[in-house]
Image: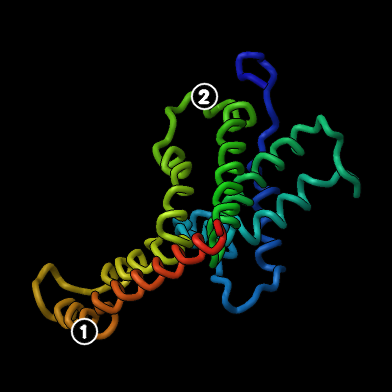
Amino acid sequence: MPLSSGISQPKLCTMETIQYIQTVIQATTTPSWINSVPHNYGHASAGSIKADEWRTLATVYLPIALVTLWGYENGSRPATDSRLLHILDHTMALFQAVTLVCRNTMNSKRALKYLSFMKTWVGSLREIHPHTERHAARPNIHAALHVQDFVLLYGPVMSWWCFPFERLVGVLQKVKTNNLVGGELFFFSNFSSNKLWNRSTLTDHFVITQERFQYSLVVESG
């Protein structure tokens, strides 16, 4: 509904919604290999949500919370013209795109399906959320539409995403330097270059991953 219509839309991100998402996060049992997210999600004390935490939220907790919150009215499916149902379908298109692109394996069908979900989400963004019309298009949305090209060229995103480097930056930010060169930071950089971040090892791993992925595409197309 356009904002110019004069009809106000009910607020989606209410405190009740945030509290319900927090309840889902706390009550959901997940495997040990799924990274944790802040149990006080939505509060200032939770700090900035990191990219990996957003991924976990979008693929695990938020789908559970929003489907059970918006996908039912008095124990049954809402009417087909329900605004909340349209918003839920639109949001789930984004969540399904994230789930697909974060798989450990990738092929051309999954890449195309990812692009289809992203186009659905982007195409309906200003219709579902009219306030976004007041903002310029974001470059990260444009970049997201090119991820299909990257996964076809380089394979699953887990082989080239930046989470390891972001984690390293986080570690370096905690190193006490007192604005001096050397000391703990110098020791850490030497140790990490020799033990943790061997450039040749990372390069070999990347090349092997690429060769395996290109071979899988050849087999698929054949």
Residues at marks 1 and 2, CA–CA distance in whole angstroms: 51 Å
Q: Is residue 153 left or right of residue 80?
A: left
Q: Is residue 36 above or below residue 220?
A: below
Q: Nearer the viewer, residue 147 or 21?
A: 147
Determine the residue located farthest toward the front in the rendered image. 222
Numbered badge on residue 133: 2
Count neighbours of disc 2 (C-alpha within 10 A) and say few if under 14, some if 14 to 19, many if 20 or more: few
Q: Quadrant of the N terminus?
A: top right
Q: Is residue 116 left or right of residue 146?
A: right
Q: Residue at position x 27%, y 77% from top?
A: 197
Identify the residue shown where x is 90% and y is 49%: 75
Q: Amino acid at mark 2?
A: Glu
Residue under the point 70% across and 62% down:
24
Residue 23 percent across, percent down from the top left: 70, 61
User: Quadrant of the rendered structure where residue 86 is?
Assistant: top right
- For residue 83, above or below residue 75: above
Marks 1 and 2 in Cβ contact (< 8 Å): no
Q: Amino acid at mark 1?
A: Asn
Secondary element at tag 2: helix
Q: Please provide percent x and percent y for residue 101.
A: 54, 56
Q: What is the x, y in percent for residue 161? A: 40, 61
Q: Is residue 59 above or below residue 191?
A: above
Q: Position of residue 39 (x, y in %)?
A: 59, 65
Query: Which numbered dot is residue 194?
Result: 1
Task: Give residue 31's quadrant in the image.
Answer: bottom right
Q: Residue at x 65, y 55 (%)?
A: 62
At mark 1, the secondary structure is helix
